[in-house]
Amino acid sequence: MQWSVASCGMQQRQIDRVSHASSSFPPALLSLLPPFSCINFANEKLQQFFNNYTFKLEESVYASEKIAFDHVSYIDNQPVLDLIEIKPRGILPMIDEELRMPNGTDKSFIDKLHTSNQAVKPYGKVLSNPNNFLVRRR
């Protein structure tokens, strides 16, 4: 599990702090980033790379060379990636920030997420459990 969290951008000393902390923070944090979530995040990054080079850049080249083409519709997943990784309100930067706080808790992390991302389209509160959140992929 430490490798999975580390591969999603966390530093080893932060992982050690989570692993050895006595607060209620570690179980919730670690359940946030199971291995499949990191794999899904990597897949989203690869999909965005593919979309950018296959569709966006090629269409701009065609347009600049005045070559006729049919636009290909695709789903742009950049808003989801931004929600996960963009500083300062992305999920991963906010986890990083909360780990640095001397008295960081699950609740303060979730409250900050809810406050910072309430207007962000892919972000959502789980109404039946306010201690959870969701990321709408599409």
Image (cartoon, rainbow, N blue to C red):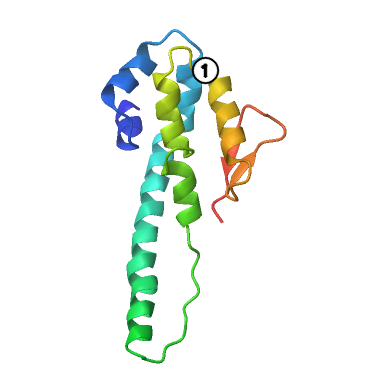
- In the rendered image, residue 60, in percent from the top left (x then y), is placed at 37, 78
Instruction: Decide if residue 127 is on the left or right side of residue 64.
Output: right
Q: Residues within 10 Å of mark 1 (few under 14, many from 20)?
A: some
Front-most of 84 and 38? 84
The amino acid pointed to by label 1 is Thr
Which residue corresponds to the image point at 42% horizontal and 88% vertical from the top-left? 69
Name, please, the residue furthest toward the top.
22
- In the rendered image, residue 63, in percent from the top left (x then y), is placed at 38, 84
Front-most of 37 and 95? 95
Q: Quadrant of the C terminus?
A: bottom right
Where on the picture, by quarter, is residue 12? top left
Instruction: Decide if residue 130 is on the left or right side of residue 85.
Output: right
Which residue corresponds to the image point at 45% horizontal and 48% vertical from the top-left? 82
Front-most of 48 and 88? 88
Which residue corresponds to the image point at 36% horizontal and 11% vertical from the top-left? 20
| Number of numbered discs visible in the structure rendering | 1
Q: Quadrant of the N terminus?
A: top left
Where on the picture, by quarter, is residue 7? top left
* SS class, disc 1: loop
Query: With respect to residue 119, does 115 lie above or below?
Result: above
Which residue corresponds to the image point at 33% horizontal and 35% vertical from the top-left? 9
Name, please, the residue furthest toward the right.
128
- In the rendered image, residue 23, in percent from the top left (x then y), is placed at 48, 10
Instruction: Decide if residue 17 is on the left or right side of residue 24.
Output: left
